[in-house]
Image: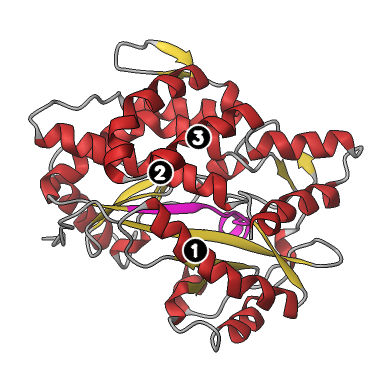
Amino acid sequence: MQIEFHPSPRPTLGVEWELALVDHRTRDLSNCAEGLLEEVRPRLPDGRRLHQELLRNTVELVTGVCETVGEAMDDLRATLDVVLPAAEAVGADLFGAGTHPFASWSTQQLSPGHRYEELINRTQWWGRQMLIWGLHVHVGMPDRDRVLPVLSSLLNYFPHLQALSASSPVWAGTDTGYASNRALMFQQLPTAGLPFQFERWGEFEAFVQDQLTTGVIEELSEIRWDVRPSPKLGTIENRVCDGVSNLRELAALVALMHCLVVDFDTRLANGEELPTMPPWHVQENKWRSARYGLEAIVILDAASEERLVTEDLEELLDRLVPVARRLRCEEELGRVAEIVSHGASYQRQRAVAERTGGDLVAVVDSVVRELTDQG
């Protein structure tokens, strides 16, 4: 089969930010997305800015096509200014993390729609367990034949993005010992997890044909890889990150993803052979960053060199400064270092739990405050 890729002449940005809804009083998840959407629709001229998701405890804030990180953040902030008071009106707050620390999957309600019902019907227990939230970032690509090489090179920095965004240490009332429990939960779905490292677009087309022929998927969007091509939009979609609690960190992560894609694409266009790693190194890095977060020692290259992820981040940020300057996101990229110095969300959540004697309601309160203080 042929999959047409609609190239983007410029490295544009699109951001999809998943947020959970928690009850004002109990701090448990609230299945009030439909009520929230009804409150929001009359106030947003463009209804596409707030989307419904698999479960009724979730909404997704979506930007338009943006040129810069700053423009994308302004877009999200404008939507947030409408959504926050609407959530207040239905008795809920917005919660930005990869998982909720004590909610039970058995009390969550499915959003209406055949696509969601079929997903749960097929995946059963694992599908019903998916109380997880993430951040998806699209970056425009100008040439179809450069998409897959850039995607494969991005996997070298999978652990850096996962460690920085990790925000899901507690599951069903228990500290899992992982920085990102979400990362390992999500890959249990049959088409989720790490992408295959194809070299040519024809290989990707043949793979998709096989998936359609054997009934694994009914449409292309059901390939839920951590990083994937988005042919209709002409982008690479990065889905590595856990849910994010505040706009400042969101801007930092989006800037890092924007710079990485543009850096690799520019180097490839200039004739450089991009660095990649064997799949077994990529898989190990995913596990290490999910387990240890910013304390992970990650594999750097095909020669099996290793380094503390925060040390490698420091060097990476220095190298990306000229790219960030060109993309007008130098300030936002600089905030990545703040996450390392102030602690990632998983570390902040654990600190609250320790300080309060394991009070998980206090943990939810702290995550909610990070958004409302900036909103």
The residue under label 2 is which amino acid type? Ala
Q: For this view, does 332 lie left or right of residue 99? A: left
Instruction: Please tell me which residue lies in front, 13 or 303.
Output: 13
Residue on which disc 1 sits: 76
Quadrant where the image shows the N terminus: bottom left
**Three-letter residue code for mark 1:** Leu
Neighbourhood count class around disc 3 (C-alpha, 10 Å): few under 14, some 14–19, many 20 upward: many
Where residue 220 sits: x, y (%)? 29, 62
> Is 131 covered by the magenta stretch?
yes
- Image quadrant where one finds the C terminus: bottom right
Q: Residue at x 81, y 39 (%)?
A: 352
x, y (%) of residue 254?
43, 47
Tell me the residue at 58%/39% (across/down).
166
Q: Which residues are magenta?
A: 123-138
What distance separates the C-alpha of mark 1 from that of mark 2? 15 Å
Q: Which mark is residue 336?
A: 3
**Residue under circle 2?**
255
